[in-house]
Image (spheres, rainbow, N blue to C red):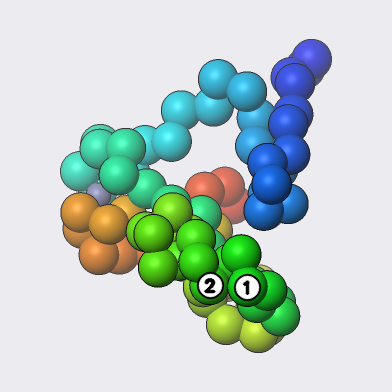
Amino acid sequence: MDSHTTMDVRGIYRIEGESIMCPYCKGNNVVDIYYGIPFQYHLEAERNGELRYGGHTRHEDSFDKFCKDCKIGYKEKEDE
Ligand SMILES: [Zn+2]
């Protein structure tokens, strides 16, 4: 696999051309869920609806993405 990754201003890695699609509604009104200590830009991004803050601790079964249409979080990939 030779995929290009970029890191945006919020420090979130994203694979170029990655399709962000909700598995439930197949829509793309999906944002990343951020875990850890929130900085000002995380809170602003959440206010702008570009990010969802998931809490301080990321657990094994924590969701990676949140669909704003379904109002539901989901795991992007299952870790093997
Ligand atoms: Zn959805």
Q: Is residue 50 above or below residue 18?
A: below
Residue at 25% from the left image edge and 36% from the top image edge: 26
**Residue most extreme to the right:** 2
Residue at 54% from the left image edge and 27% from the top image edge: 18
Residue at 32% from the left image edge and 54% from the top image edge: 67
Q: Is mark 1 within 8 Å of ligand 1?
A: no
Q: Secondary structure at mark 2?
A: helix
Residue at 63% from the left image edge and 73% from the top image edge: 40
The amino acid type, in three-letter code, at marker 1 is Gln
Where residue 4 appears, as percent x and y from the top left, is 75, 21
Where residue 42 appears, as percent x and y from the top left, is 59, 67
Q: Is residue 72 above or below residue 78?
A: below
Q: Is residue 58 visible?
A: no
Q: Secondary structure at mark 1?
A: helix
The residue singled out by tag 1 in the image is: 40
The residue singled out by tag 2 in the image is: 43
How far separated are the C-alphas under marks 1 and 2? 5 Å
Q: Is residue 24 left or right of residue 17?
A: left
Where residue 39 appears, as percent x and y from the top left, is 68, 74
Around disc 1, counting alpha carbons within 10 Å, would you say few (fewer than 14), some (14 to 19), or many (20 or more)?
few
The amino acid type, in three-letter code, at marker 2 is Leu
Where residue 65 appears, as percent x and y from the top left, is 47, 55
Around disc 2, counting alpha carbons within 10 Å, would you say few (fewer than 14), some (14 to 19), or many (20 or more)?
some
**CB within 8 Å, label 1 to label 2:** yes
